[in-house]
Image (cartoon, grey):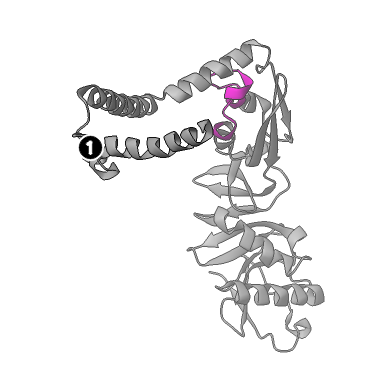
Amino acid sequence: MSAKIARGSQSRSRPKAKSLSRGSSKKAPPPRMLDALPLSAETVRRVSGWIFLAVLLALAIAVAAALQVPQMIGTSIGEAVGQAGFSVKRVEIKGLNRMQRLPVYSVALDQNSMAMPLVDLEGTRERLLRFGWVEDARVYRRLPDTLVVDIVERQPAAIWQHNQQLTLIDRDGIVLEPVKLDAMPDLPLVIGPGANRRSGELGRLLAAAPEIKPMMEGATWIGGRRWDLRFQSGEVLALPEGQGAAQKALVKFARMDKMTQLLGRGFARFDMRVPGKFIVRVSREPGSTVPDIEANVPTGAPVDARKTI
């Protein structure tokens, strides 16, 4: 009996709950209606506050970037590292043979801060490359306190005479340093405006006739077009325009000199500018004569011997 009553009460309790829910005058709004309800004033204030803080934070970041605040923080950290013992106390220079060491030291030590993290490696390298002698440079740190500068020097290739001044140049015509007349190195002399930029071309030209190079004293770049070669024995050889034509003429002259010994026999000038002709001029000295060379000149090299007036 009691068991039945218990089951009956449970069965009746459920409908009662439903009837109360249905009979209530205030019905629960569906989920979509909840979303449409207006927010409370407190919630609006909180959301507005967060939006304001986000905008303020974005402005603060922009201002900090404009004022280089991150760099200032990095600088402070770098200075702290330097005070801990990691600062430049030595400069080690490698690769110098001809250039003075003092200018390199001066550039390496010209830093806004000597703290190792703050040393401007790329800026130091760029300043070193402004020196004529420096073809390349590498700058790096060796912890805890050494700045290493590794220099690649340019190699002297010739002496350039221009505007009554002598300067040492490399194969690319880069000016290295002035040269004193009483201390000239044993290098070819190139003369004339722009001759320094043609020194590499001259080197390739002489490489075609290596037996001529030891007898040369200098070369003059004429009119920005061609070379006149001057020999130690006093003669001048006028070469034609164009690298190919000049090389062909010089090889031919070297072969003729080997067979007839043109140099050192009293001639003043050899002119090979006209294709197929070999014009010879003798000295201006009174009583000079034209040496007999026609019998020894190779076939195909006609000679026009003239006495200069």
Quadrant hosting residue 131: top right
Q: Quadrant of residue 97?
A: top right
Q: Find residue 301 and report its horizontal and vertical position in percent.
A: 69, 85
Image position, residue 112 (x, y; %) = 52, 20
Number of residues whose C-alpha sits closer than 10 Å to that of mark 1, classed few (under 14), some (14–19) or many (20 or more): few
Q: Residue at the spot x=66%, y=63% of the render?
A: 235
Position of residue 1 relative to residue 184, above or below, is above
Residue furthest to the bottom: 299
Taking the spot 65% from the left edge, 53% from the top edge, the residue there is 171
> What is the three-letter code of the residue carrying label 1?
Gly
The residue depicted at 32 percent of the width and 39 percent of the height is 18
Q: Quadrant of residue 297?
A: bottom right
| Residue 22 appears left or right of 302 | left
Seen from the viewer's position, the closer of residues 130 and 41 is: 41
Q: Is residue 255 left or right of residue 136?
A: right
Determine if the magenta segment contains residue 121: yes
Q: Residue furthest top?
A: 83
The magenta segment is: 107-123
Please determine whether, in this image, residue 121 is positioned above or below residue 194. Answer: above
- Mark 1 highlights which residue? 23
